[in-house]
Amino acid sequence: MINKILTALLILMSHSSFSQIYEDYLGAGQQIGIKVQSSPHVNPDTSIYTISGTTLIPDLIGASRFLSQATLGINYEEIEHVSTIGIDAWLDEQFALSESSYMERYDSLYQEIQLIVTENTIHRPSYHSITFYDCIFNDLDFLRQKIGFALSQILVISKAGDLSDKPERLFGVHDALYQGAFGNFRDMLGNVTYSYGMSTYLSYFNNRRADVIGNTQPDENYAREIMQLFSIGLIKLNIDGTPIKDSNGDNIPTYDIENIEELAKVFTGLTLNGDEQLPLVVNDDIHSIGSKHIIDDVIIPSGQSGAEDVEQALDVLFNHPNVGPFIGMRLIQQLVKSNPTPAYIKRVAMVFNDNGLGERGDLKEVIRAILLDPEARNCDWIDHPENGKLIQPVERFVTLYKAFDISSPTGVLWMDDVGSFGGSLQQAFQASPTVFNFFSPFFAEDNVIAPLGLRSPEFQILDNITSINYLNIMENRLKGEEAFLNLTTSNTGNNLNRDTNNKPVLDFTDELAIYQNEGIEALLDRLDILICRGQLSQGVKNIIIDTINENILNVNGYDETNMMHDILYYIFLSPDYMIQK
């Protein structure tokens, strides 16, 4: 029976899609002439949106689609909440929530863990994952969590290497991203630069000025990556993200090797200020003296302190015209779609350049612009052949767990995503193999996507092996004894282990009540909204219904829980879920 549904779903996967084209603008006071519709295949058709000024009140399907872009995962009640108060009001609610601290949460959880793991004080990599998901499962700042996760794949630090047992350093950087998610990008860039974790990851901690006698030069790693990956990119861009060309029609580099060498001099002398959790300071005794000739013919003069050099260099990078389209496109790709149109990138970059009040780099308004843009909100674009993005592995499992209010007998949920799925699916929190993230924003699948001139970043980690692994892991998480291995006990006192008395469970109470009262079609309609953003096709629904009915008739002991597990398994395999549109 599984072969029947998998065959049908694989056929449907050939119709997956990637980006959008739109000319109008929604938000910032512009709404005249804009008509917003919901998915036409939903029956009954509830495709009515109300635009009042700039306030968008979506139906349940529209709310679900919005939340799939704005969060890592939510439950049905949050969808109803957005449908009641509207998208603008929900954004204002989320922007107003106070941030927490992953570093502080880690410190607190580490103390709890030490009451269980009594034989050593090692800071194990699993504790890092446990902390991240403890925040995801329990905190209500859904938007900040999503933006923090997106930024962690742009300004990358990873435990894949020397930092595997240094969660404090990793969370020091993540707090800079997560806490700064609604702040100013210049502040974030500075906080990341002055973080001990990033300085050790990209090897500029205690970076020393050139030593002629010792024949050593400053480490160039951070100078290269802060430009290439964190701010301006490799080539000069128009405000719409398209390359600026020279007179020969070639791309124009943003910097050269000499610029890297000169900027490396700026990032010398950064060292501890007594505590690893405090921002670094510049030790002028090992900082490069003299002028530095960095990008765009800017000369940092001699005679300044090391701190003044760093601040001036960061200002130059932040004010480069590339930053708006470069960071804007990266965030659009993380939140909404793999192939935004130049017009979409331009609208977002313009907000980055000026939030309407003369401020550059206001990330809160950039986020608002991304999520309220017509290419994100107008459902006319759902079926455009270039629309959408592949949902990332971390997001798939968080979607499952949040949708059904995962819980445990003790209320404690400690998950190691590397062990649960990350190692097999090539993605776990802050565990990319290099500073270049899990996948490139420029990756294009060879056979279909690249010939069309499009990009499919997340497909870089979807291959024959990870696809089969996903099928098996999702089946195990749904049909096995527990939703994941809850590491809340210790067998030896040396490490956390699976707690068979504290198994995580998914709550299907509401869904089973709908099935019992209204039948399987009503159940699928609810799951369509909850999981698939209203995009579960009737063809897939029919396959699922036929398969479930056959199982009820032919499989001994097939109960409603088995049915829920099968339905969710089929849905989470479907491209109607996997491709976010």
Image (cartoon, helix red, strand yellow):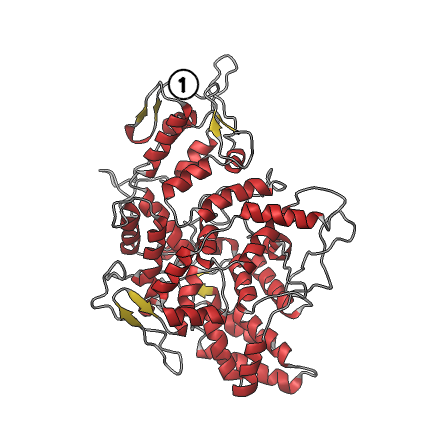
Q: Mark 1 is on which residue type?
A: Ile
Is 343 placed above or below 171 here? below
Q: Report if residue 240 is visible in the image.
A: no
Tell me the quadrant of the picture where the N terminus can be found: bottom right
Residue under the image location 69 percent in, 68 percent down: 481
Where residue 385 appears, x then y in whole percent? 35, 65
Is 433 placed above or below 380 here? above
Nearest the viewer among 260 and 356 is 356
- In this figure, which residue is indicated by the disc labeled 1? 289
Residue at the top extreme, as displayed: 213
Q: Report if residue 40 is visible in the image.
A: yes
Q: Is residue 301 left or right of residue 511?
A: left
Q: Is residue 71 left or right of residue 300?
A: right
Tell me the quadrant of the picture where the C terminus can be found: bottom left
Q: Is residue 467 left or right of residue 352?
A: right
- Judging from the image, what secondary structure is the residue with disc 1 in? loop
Is 249 placed above or below 407 here? above
